[in-house]
Amino acid sequence: MTLTEIYEIYLQHTDVCTDTRKLSKGCLFFALRGDNFNGNKFAEQALNEGAAYCIIDEPAYAIDKKCILVNDVLSTLQDLAKHHRQQLNLPVIAIVGSNGKTTTKELISSVLQTQFQVLSTPGNFNNHIGLPLTLLMLNKTHQIAVIEMGANHENENALLCEIACPSHGLITNNGKDHLEGFGSLEGVINSNAELFSYLHEHKGIAFVNGADEVLMQKSSTIKNRIIYQNSEHEKIDVHHTYIKANSLQPQINFAIESTAIASNLSGDYNFDNILAAVSIGLHFGLNPTAIKLGIESYEPKNLRSQLIEKEHNKIFLDAYNANPSSMEASIRNFMAMPGNNKLLILGDMFELGKYEAEEHQNLVTFCENLGVKEAILVGKAFYKTQSHYKKFEETVEVSNYLKASPVQDKFVFLKGSRGMKIESLIEAL
């Protein structure tokens, strides 16, 4: 069956599913294969539970005329998503970068939703499987798509761009994320710059943080470039006044064209994310009042920059993920926030490869030099570091320790890689 024929079927059954546990009646089931599973084996179950068709790539499982046999299910899913995106004449804004992608995506969506019907990447649907599933959620009611792209090796962002065909894009920053896959910081920079290469080749529009010399250099060939931060050598497209957080109000306050905006975010790094959203809002014709509504209505959630008040302690939860760059920025921001009796609980940073021991020790030294007096380090990598801080190998050990030795009247910072599940310590606090 040709892609065009599959697309005609998709138009009649636009709900796409890859997991029988989340099946909906009348959906298209794509039988993806992975290292530890084979979706083809679930085709019969999917049909029995109400799937309209199953896309499979192993002939042995073609038990019904509703089983559509293709050469490769994943490639078909990606090709179908690209074809669908190309049928819709709407802006697609791609977001890549080491840190802040999801916060930036949410801010941009919150701003644009004040005037447009927007589809943005749900949850963590940002990889080679999640991105096509996101694109297949698009329909004719949508006016703009805000698409997050997550990569952990070179050439992956290039692939995601070929699927999503972005008309606009931005790189939040370059940091030490996924060093195991990228090999080095240079590998990270080159991978993120794959978005700029795509926009250059396809005459797209790039939003660039003018205060970042690397991003300025990597975007220099893009004709349609909009600068949204301070730049010494180009016109600043977003005029703003940054009102620093004071001792009573740690959140970011600023003004655009004399319109005062009070965000619910803290940290200079989040101001960069906010300005990206402001820049895109202005580009799409929103006035400062609409932008103010979008920024101020965004509340940090999903384990990102959340302030939580508990009975005995106040918690700053930023535990969705972690790498050396995001750790340093978040810790520096936390230590500058008002409050006494601060306690850091830091979980291991994953996917660092050969840099694991060095980067964990560097972070411990960073904390000591910053004046962090009290910290709990958790994870096998942190356990091997040299420091005077308390250390545990497993998160559950910290939970047991906190229950046996409760902390009170503390301002607690929680951060670690997703697999550490540092947020599970909230109950013990």
Image (spheres, rainbow, N blue to C red):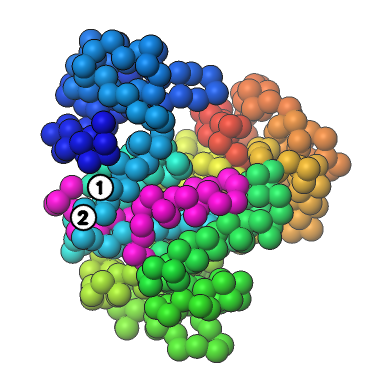
Per the image, label 1 sits on a secondary structure element best described as: helix
Q: Residue furthest right?
A: 386
Rendered location of residue 94, percent (x, y): 40, 58
The amino acid type of the residue labelled 1 equals His
Left or right side of 249 for 183: right
Rendered location of residue 102, percent (x, y): 43, 51
What is the quadrant of residue 353 in the picture?
A: top right
What is the quadrant of residue 387 in the picture?
A: top right
Q: Looking at the figure, which quarter contains the C terminus?
A: top right
Rendered location of residue 66, percent (x, y): 21, 19
Residue 151 painted magenta = yes
The residue at which mark 2 appears reads as: 88
Q: Is residue 306 visible?
A: no
Please tell me how crowded label 2 is: few (under 14), some (14-19), or many (20+) other residues with Cα within 10 Å.
some
Rendered location of residue 101, percent (x, y): 47, 54
Per the rendered image, the range of residues in magenta is 139-168
Camera-side residue: 153 or 4?
4
Residue 164 painted magenta = yes
In this rendering, the answer to whether 375 lies above or below 333 is above
Per the image, label 2 sits on a secondary structure element best described as: loop
Q: Residue at x 44, y 85 (%)?
A: 236
Left or right side of 218 for 343: right
Q: Is mark 1 in CB contact (under 8 Å) with mark 2?
A: yes
Camera-side residue: 422 or 323?
323
The residue at which mark 1 appears reads as: 84
Q: Residue at x 44, y 50 (%)?
A: 160
